Amino acid sequence: GDVIEKDSDIFGDGVNVASRIEPLADKGGICISNEVYRSISAQKDILTASLGEYELKNIVEKWHIFRVFLDKDEYQSWAEKSFSQKKIFERKSKTLKRVVFTLFFLVIILVNIPLIKASYLGYIQSNNINDLYENIQVVIKINRLNENVSLKKTKDDIYLSIPTSGFFNSGSATLDTNKSTQVLIIITELINSFDGFVEINGNTDNMTAPKRFKLKYRNNFELSGARVA
């Protein structure tokens, strides 16, 4: 652009651009815009190198800046230094990527550990339940307990129901060993072979117990609780 001289000072668009480019040059160095570079690029004795695009203060568009070298030695020194810095940057970049990837991988693992653990435990529990169910079926069949035992399986549980008449005499909470020994031994062995939660419940109504049992139990609920205990 035009340059205006006034009172030993100069003004103009070109002067403004030059003042923005000046800080990009090293001490004693020369930097030029793309327009200047195009005008001197045909002169083989002038050595230049691209510094890339820069945002200049108070100028909207990015400007492509070039560096001018005084001689071949200065150019070679700059090229070697730039190459070395580029390699250092690439190494740091690769290291940073590995660190970020490792941290990301660790976070993923830490976040999913509870899910993996729950899934694994669920898998083990499911296998244990299936194995126990099959073992109970075999035991029931071998010992011909089909008429005395009810077996039911869901996704997470097994329900084994045995009438109290197979363990207790009417109105009593004391085990009848003549009736229960065989079944209790079988049940105990099955429970001991199962690595999981076992719950024993007694189910009954809350009707008033017959008069002959009232001295010990007010109702069937109390009698059932005593039998479970």
Image: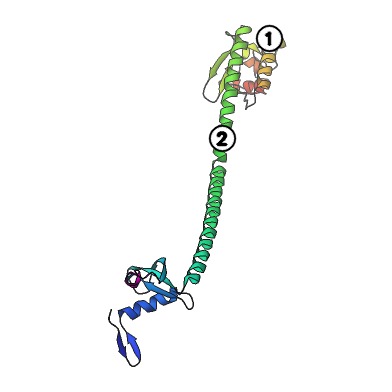
Q: Position of residue 139 (x, y in %)?
A: 63, 11
Question: Could you say where residue 185 lies in the image, as x and y percent from the top left?
Answer: 70, 14
Query: Is there any visible trace of residue 95 in the rendered image?
Result: yes
**Coloration mode:** rainbow
Tell me the kind of residue under disc 2.
Ala
Tally the marks.
Answer: 2
Circles 1 and 2, Cβ within 8 Å, touching? The answer is no
Badge 1 crowding class, 10 Å Cα cut-off, few under 14, some 14 to 19, many 20 or more, is some
Identity, as a three-letter code, of the amino acid under mark 1: Lys
> Which image quarter: residue 109?
top right
Q: Nearer the viewer, residue 11 or 208?
A: 11
Q: For the N terminus, which image quadrant? A: bottom left
Asked if residue 213 is among those painted magenta in the image, a careful observer would answer no
The residue range painted magenta reads 36-43
Helix, strand or loop for disc 1: helix
Q: Nearer the viewer, residue 41 or 190?
A: 41
Q: Judge whether residue 217 can be spotted in this image.
A: no
Q: Is residue 39 magenta?
A: yes
Which quadrant of the view contains residue 210? top right
Secondary element type, mark 2 = helix
Which residue carries the number 1 mark? 179
Percent position (x, y) of residue 101? 53, 48
Q: Position of residue 142 (x, y in %)?
A: 63, 7
- Mark 2 burial class by Cα count in 10 Å: few <14, some 14-19, many 20+: few
Residue located 55% across and 57% down the image = 92
Residue 226, above or below 84: above
91 to 107, vertically: above or below: below
Residue 128: which disc?
none
Residue 118: mark: 2
